[in-house]
Image (cartoon, rainbow, N blue to C red):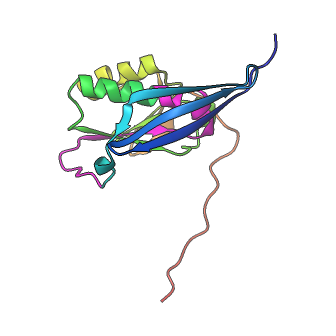
């Protein structure tokens, strides 16, 4: 069995009516380029603005760092956003793709705020469940959670347990 290297790049095609964002996957074993487009990524040039977030009940952060992207973060993002739309939750839930959230071993990582619940190993199917269970009914998916708030601070309940703590940053002082 030969190994297959897949290079994923985001590409943006800009036209007169807006942009289409897609994925370009380059398969090394066939030297083939395949473009995959997701309707959820069709955006108007006018919509690339600052959103009015009044009335938002939750913020969902979706890691799109390198490891999560390699493990299907784009597909998770599309599934979650489609289900939010289908359930009519767009006015109440804002989603944001982030860079690395620092939990690569738990990829794909999704965080729901203000609940401060971190989910691990997210797939498109689990993203649909997240919308119907946590975001609609308010019932966290405890079996998929890696961190939960306990007495106001995060407590790890599952997932990869590193042997080192997050490094502390040096104190920053303002200069007059």
Residue closer to the observer: 115 or 11? 11
Q: What span is in magenta?
A: 50-75
* Rendered position, 7 above or below 154: above
Position of residue 150 in the picture relative to residue 87 (left or right): right
Residue closer to the observer: 30 or 77? 30
Is residue 111 in view from this perspective?
Answer: yes
Give the number of callouts: 0
Position of residue 176 in the picture relative to residue 91 (left or right): right
Q: Is residue 57 magenta?
A: yes
The residue sitting at the front extreme is: 16
Is residue 138 in view from this perspective?
Answer: no
Residue at 20% in and 38% down: 91
Residue at 34% in and 30% down: 81
Residue at 47% in and 23% down: 144
Which quadrant of the structure image shows residue 172? Answer: bottom right
Q: Position of residue 73 (x, y in %)?
A: 51, 31
């Amino acid at each position: 069995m030969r190994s297959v290297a897949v290079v994923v790049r985001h590409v943006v095609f800009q036209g007169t009516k807006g942009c289409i964002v897609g994925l370009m996957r380059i398969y090394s074993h066939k030297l083939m380029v395949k473009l995959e487009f997701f309707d959820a990524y069709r955006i108007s040039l006018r919509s690339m603005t600052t959103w009015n977030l009044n009335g938002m009940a939750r913020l969902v952060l979706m890691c799109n760092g390198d490891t999560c992207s390699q493990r299907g973060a784009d597909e998770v993002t599309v599934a979650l956003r489609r289900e939010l739309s289908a359930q009519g939750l767009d006015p109440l839930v804002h989603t944001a793709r982030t860079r690395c959230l620092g939990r690569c071993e738990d990829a794909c990582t999704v965080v729901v705020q203000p609940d401060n619940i971190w989910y691990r190993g997210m797939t498109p199917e689990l993203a649909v469940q997240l919308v119907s269970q946590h975001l609609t009914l308010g019932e966290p998916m405890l079996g998929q959670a890696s961190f939960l708030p306990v007495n106001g601070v995060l407590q790890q309940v599952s997932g990869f347990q590193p042997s080192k703590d997050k490094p502390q940053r040096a104190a920053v002082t303002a200069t007059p």
